[in-house]
Amino acid sequence: MSATQTFLDELQSYVGKRYGVVYSWDCVNEPMIRQWCEALDFDFIPYTDLLKAVSTAHRGIVAPAAMLPVWLMPGLRNQRPDGSDLSNNREIMPFLEQHGYVGILGTNCEQEYERPLRPGERISCTHMTESLSEEKQTKFGKGFFITFLQEFFDAQDQLVGTMRLRILRFKPQAQTKVEESVAKPLPAQPVLSPDTAFFWEGLKAGKLLIQRCQSCQVLQHPPVPACMSCHSLSTDFVESSGMGHLVSFVVIHKPQVVGFEYPHPVGLIELDEGVRLVAPIGGVSLDKLQIGMRVKAHMEPNADAYRLPTFYVVEGH
Ligand code: ZN
């Protein structure tokens, strides 16, 4: 048997393997729901207003569906409650790394929800490497697309939701090729949809455009098919001044993906028009970054690729 076949057989042996139950540290709870909603600037009575929530169809507080994976996060100490399966449920990852597939790129994430979760419920989950593509040639290098399935259960072991995370693990193109190339590698490009095309095309034209509801005039970002306030399907957009302030930030060191320089500071920016977006921060030393700093967007008109604006700190903020 060839070395390649042995490698592929071992790689395949991880697919379909189910790992044991992992328990959540905390029950579904109102403080975490409130903080999550505040961080995302999300206002919806059944999530945050107990007195009014009882008279909605939910008859009380429910957790936002998209919080599903939040309940199973291990925390900063990366530990799990007693009784949890502590084995590495992504052991396919170090195996691929050992064989030179050191690049990693998240491609997409899909969540499905069976029912709303209520405060007091204890959620658990199991993990599985659900599927693996054949080796593919991508613009980043040769690699495998891997789908991880996480299934979430309530205290009666009934399925309450699933999350599929798809990633690409690849062997980065040989370094010499990158050095020979005059052009810098491009960052991964967005998939344009009828709802988002105006935003990306606007950036290429040097404009930061924000979706506006034509019925109630509310601004929202990111662009979606309907108004989140009045559900109208009639939307257009306005041009932002590009001015705003830093609400939060992170500095990404790893994993390093093609097309960005590291360490890579990324901010949550609140524009003066009132909407928030996530975008790179430039031109400031990392130890000077502070929440609340005034920032201004810079776009590159006629750029070679779709790129988010970079926000620069405005002096004397
Ligand atoms: Zn509206």
Image: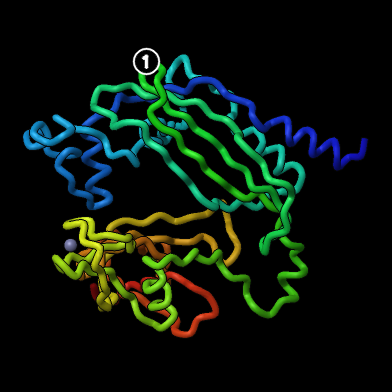
Coloration mode = rainbow
Total tally of numbered discs in the picture: 1
Q: Is residue 1 above or below residue 218?
A: above
Within 10 angstroms of label 1, few (less than 14), some, or many (20 or more) residues? few
Q: Is residue 314 above or below residue 289?
A: below
Question: Which secondary structure, mark 1?
Answer: loop
Q: Farthest front residue?
A: 233
Q: Position of residue 291 (x, y in %)?
A: 28, 59
Q: Is residue 264 left or right of 231 when viewed as pictured?
A: right
Residue at 44% in and 56% down: 251
Answer whether residue 254 is visible to the viewer in this image: no
Q: Is residue 223 above or below residue 84?
A: below
Image quadrant where residue 153 sits: top left
Image quadrant where residue 241 sits: bottom left
What amino acid type should be assigned to the residue bearing mark 1? Gln
Q: Position of residue 57 (x, y in %)?
A: 15, 34
Q: Is residue 133 above or below residue 239?
A: above
Q: Is residue 248 left or right of 108 when viewed as pictured?
A: left
Assign ligand 1 to one image quadrant: bottom left
Q: Farthest right residue?
A: 1
Residue at 76% in and 70% down: 177
Q: Nearer the viewer, residue 44 or 122?
A: 44
Image quadrant where residue 270 sits: bottom left
Quarter placement of the C terminus? bottom left
Residue at 51% in and 60% down: 263
Q: Position of residue 129 (x, y in %)?
A: 61, 34
Which residue carries the number 1 mark?
156
Answer whether residue 101 is visible to the viewer in this image: yes
Q: Nearer the viewer, residue 22 or 197?
A: 197
Q: Is mark 1 within 8 Å of ligand 1?
A: no
Q: Position of residue 300 (x, y in %)?
A: 45, 81
Q: Is residue 23 left or right of 313 when viewed as pictured?
A: right
